[in-house]
Every structure is written in structure tokens, then in C-alpha cells.
Image (tube, helix red, strand yellow):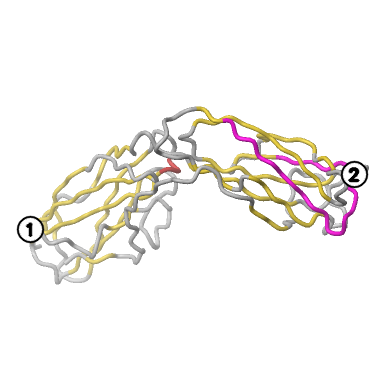
Amino acid sequence: MLQSAYFTPLKSAIAFFAVICLSSLILITACDSGPGATSFTNNTNLLKQITIQPGEIVFDPEQTISDTTITVLIRVETAAGETLTAPQFRVERDGSNQIFREGQLQALPNQSGQYEGSFAFTVPTNTFAELKIFAFDVFEDGKLSNTLNTRLSLTGFASEPPLIEFFNSPDEVVLPAEGDKLLRFESKVTHPQGNSLIEGVFLEIFDSSGSRIGEGPFSMLDDGNTDESGDLEAGDNIFTRVLTVSSTNQPDSFSLFSYAVDRQGLSSDTLFSTMTFVLP
């Protein structure tokens, strides 16, 4: 029978359903990596913690796609009730150094060392994104305090399924007289709403008797890890699975199926192919 050339955990095609609209407050403590190239002061413990509300945004898939305005509240606390010079916040989209929103943090009345700010933005409810939020103080000499950061994730719902563009597999395999032979299976998958929505790409193999090869669908990966998954290039949307056959395999014919599932549980078309083992 076919054997996996590299061990990779199977990833079940589990549907992802978002049911909560807004989560509650979250708390993130200090992190000393700050935005920009401005020099830091020696006071790396000035800011103590940052909270945001909501801490997560999950759109309800039962609702229609529409534009929604979201307001995010940021609160920062200093370590020992210090007064800040020019506290600021900055928001970036994850994976980008571009500023999405920025503004000033204002001191809260009668609350020593407490500062607050907010920003708003409008997105459609099928948006999947992650924002990174920074808070820091700017001193009169232009240097920064320590910088706090946290993340705000937006989980929308997919309105279109993933697209499987091709599925490549061996047609006829001459079994090795001795040793092993690697077999490569590749599927190209994209998603019309962004490739980050792809939950998994899968390969199923059945022999001529209808028995499944393996305990479940084989996961196909696009990680560029040639030593483990066998994938040649990460991020090219070509998902790969490498299996081995050996001299102990017998002639047979196989039915092959490949498909993709997104985070909403929507499935692509299933592409079909056949493969035959023959003696050398």
C-alpha cells in the first residue's frame, strides 16, 4: 500500500462558524518592540499594560454582507501612575508597516496614570483581517518610552468557496524493483476573498476495491518545506503531498480526489484523477 513519505499531522476539514459578534475586553502586558526607528529612552518600564475593547470581532454568518462601522477603545496604564508627555497610539494591518490609524491618548480625569483613546473604521462583514495596535509615549527629545502592543482580529464569513485550479498526480507508476520511489501530488488553490481564508487542501486515495489509503484525507501543504512536506515553494498556492511506494507494492489502480475547504466550511469543486501501478 501507499505510505506517507513524511509524517505530517492530518488536518480535518472542520467547518468554521462564527457566532459571536463582539468579544469582551482583553488585556495584554508590555512588549518592548516599538514602531518606527526612533530611539528608546532608558525607561523601559514606563507603560505597564494596554487593554482594548472589543478584543475580538466575529461577524455572524447568519447576517447578510453589509458595511459595519467599528469603534475600538484603547486604554493604557503607566507602571506607577506617572504623567506621560505625549502618549500616542498607532494601528497597522498585520503584515504591513503602513499606518492604518493613529492618534493621541488622553489622560482620564481623576485617574492617575490612566490614558485612553479610540479609533473607528468601516469594513464589510465578510472581512478577515488582523490589526496590530501600538501605544507609546514620546518625550520632548523625540525618544520613545517602551511600547505596548496587542492585536485585534476580525473574523468575517466567506460568501464564495475556494477555487481549485488544477490537480497534478502521477498517471502510471512503474513500481521500483528495489527501494522506494517518491510520488508527488499537487493542487493549486486560491480564494476569491483572500488566500488566508483557506483552511486546508486535501487528497483522498482509494484502491480498486474502494478501500481508502490512509486513515483519512491527506493534508496538502504550501509551506516550502522540501524536507518534510515536499512542497517546493511557500506561498505560491500550490499545495503538495509526497507519498512513497516501494518494491513491496503490488500492481493496482487508484481513484484520486483533491479539494479545498475554507474557514467558513465552504468547499471547492473536487478534482478527480486516476493512477495505476505496474510492474517494472
| Mark linked to residue 42 | none
Q: Residues within 10 Å of mark 2 (few under 14, many from 20)?
A: few
Instruction: Name the main secondary structure of what is drawn in magenta.
Output: strand
> Is 32 left, or right, of 19 in this rendering?
right
| Mark linked to residue 85 | 2
Q: Residue furthest front?
A: 110
Q: Residue flagged by tag 1: what amino acid is it?
A: Ser
The residue lying at 9 percent from left, 66 percent from top is 250
Residue that badge 1 annotates? 208
Q: Which of 93/55 is in front? A: 55
For the N terminus, the image quarter is bottom left
Q: Residue flagged by tag 2: what amino acid is it?
A: Thr
Q: CA distance from mark 1 to mark 2?
A: 74 Å
> Is residue 71 magenta-colored?
yes
For the C terminus, the image quarter is bottom left
**Residue 180, x across and y down, in percent:** 23, 67
> Is residue 113 magenta-colored?
no
**Residue 154, x across and y down, in percent:** 53, 42
- Height in image: 186 above or below 214? above
For discs 1 and 2, the disc positioned in front in the rendered view? 2
Check if mark 1's residue and mark 2's residue have beta carbons within 8 Å: no
**Residue 94, x across and y down, in percent:** 59, 43
> Is 92 left, or right, of 46 in this rendering?
left
- Quarter of the figure with residue 182: bottom left
- The region drawn magenta spans 69-90
**Residue 81, x across and y down, in percent:** 88, 55
> Is 246 left, or right, of 68 in this rendering?
left
Q: Which of 5/110 is in front? A: 110
Sequence order check, earlier mark of 1 and 2: 2
